[in-house]
């Protein structure tokens, strides 16, 4: 009855592969979803699709994954590449970014007297930081996430997004300045800092 | 630091219960200055505060070449104005990196992923 044994054996293979996948890859599901939310600007449906696609690709490539190497980094790379492919496809032209509303004077010059040692950052809860990132204009947000969460260099971001390094630099600058301003306005509204008049 | 201990710490600070009862820590002071050059800066070209500030992120991101990075370092370590500013920007980037990469859980997603794998395995 070898005809019956074969499917049984393959089910067994499948289930042990799945157990392994579960233990090594799916334990990072929350990390992937968190990163997906940051990249998509808090778009839950898009982030869920992104994670599902990542999991599927990871499952199909599981035989080429070397057990014991950094699985989280491997998965995050798949997630990033999946996101960027889609991002570049739908993006034939860049976002019209309103450069004029970026304040020239950095938040620091307003905070310097009151909070020279940066305790301001401790007063801000994680939710607020996450929300401020997710609300950035898409081009700024993606550049910032690739740099500050993924840890890519300017050259790597330039290559991944197909934009000049100078653009990476200026987007990062503006994204970070905007973020600081958001957090500063929030801290002022909560009374954590007084804020200078004028 | 947990959300709760952060809040407690803030409360303590507001109530002046922290060591010394000071409301804010003093501005971090540049380690050199007043004619006292940081080590290795004797032959490094001097740059202005504006130029240093323009390169703050490239410097902190490790994106400057050695020569430019040295110019910025030599300026910042002896500049009363730039030292606390660079320190502050570094704290900002650290906060961003440490705290923005928060995992998020979703039960629906978990179920969908399970279904996806069930279908894939067949």
Image (tube, rainbow, N blue to C red):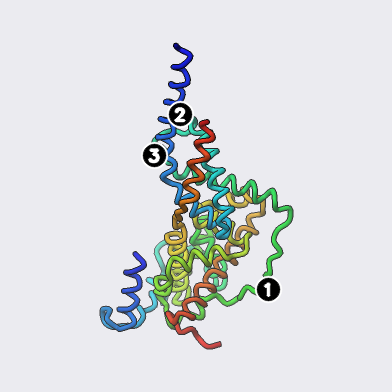
Q: Nearer the viewer, residue A55 or B70?
A: A55
Which secondary structure, mark 1? helix
Q: Where in the figure is residue A23, as x and y percent of width and height? A: 39, 39
Outermost bottom residue: A197
Q: Position of residue A95 (x, y in %)?
A: 69, 61
Q: Chain of mark 3?
A: A
Is residue A190 visible in the rendered structure shown here?
yes
- Residue matched to label 3: A23
Nearest to N terminus: mark 1 or mark 3: 3
| Towards the viewer: B42 or B78 | B78
Residues at circles 2 and 3 in contact by the CB criterion of under 8 Å: no
* Residue situated in front as seen by the camera: B62 or A27: A27
The residue at which mark 1 appears reads as: A100
**Distance from the alpha carbon under mark 1 to that under mark 3:** 49 Å
Q: Is disc 2 placed on a helix, strand or loop?
A: helix
Q: Position of residue A141 (x, y in %)?
A: 58, 60
Whichever of labels 1 and 2 marks the residue nearer the N terminus, that label is 2
Name the image quarter holding the N terminus of chain A: top left
Tag 1, which chain? A
Residue B42 shows in the view: no
Give residue A14's mark. 2
Same chain? Circles 2 and 3: yes
Quadrant for the C terminus of chain A, please.
Answer: bottom right
């Amino acid at each position: 009855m070898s005809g019956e044994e074969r499917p049984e054996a393959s089910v067994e293979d499948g289930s042990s592969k799945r157990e392994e996948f579960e233990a090594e890859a799916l334990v990072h599901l929350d990390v992937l979803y968190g990163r997906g939310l940051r990249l998509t600007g808090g778009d839950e449906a898009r982030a869920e699709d992104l994670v599902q696609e990542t999991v599927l690709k990871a499952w199909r490539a599981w035989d080429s994954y070397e057990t014991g190497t950094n699985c989280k980094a491997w998965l995050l790379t798949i997630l990033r590449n999946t996101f960027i492919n889609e991002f570049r496809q739908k993006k034939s032209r860049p976002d019209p970014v309103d450069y004029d509303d970026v304040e020239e004077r950095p938040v620091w010059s307003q905070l310097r007297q009151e909070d020279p040692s940066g305790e301001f950052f401790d007063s801000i809860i994680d939710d607020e930081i996450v929300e401020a990132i997710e609300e950035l204009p898409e081009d700024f947000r993606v550049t910032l996430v690739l740099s500050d969460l993924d840890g890519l260099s300017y050259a790597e971001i330039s290559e991944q997004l197909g934009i000049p390094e100078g653009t990476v630099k200026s987007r990062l600058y503006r994204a970070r300045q905007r973020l600081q301003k958001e957090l500063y306005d929030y801290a002022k509204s909560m009374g954590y800092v007084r804020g200078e008049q004028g | 630091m947990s959300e709760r201990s952060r809040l407690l710490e803030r409360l303590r600070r507001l109530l002046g219960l922290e060591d010394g009862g000071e409301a804010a820590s003093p501005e971090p002071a540049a380690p050199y200055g007043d004619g006292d050059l940081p080590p290795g800066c004797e032959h490094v070209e001097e740059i202005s505060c504006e130029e240093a500030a323009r390169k703050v992120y490239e410097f902190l991101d490790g994106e400057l070449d050695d020569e430019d990075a040295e110019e910025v370092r030599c300026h910042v370590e002896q500049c009363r104005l730039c030292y606390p500013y660079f320190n502050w920007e570094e704290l900002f980037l650290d906060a961003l990196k440490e705290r923005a990469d928060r995992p998020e859980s979703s039960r629906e997603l978990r179920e969908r992923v399970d279904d996806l794998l069930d279908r894939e395995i067949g």
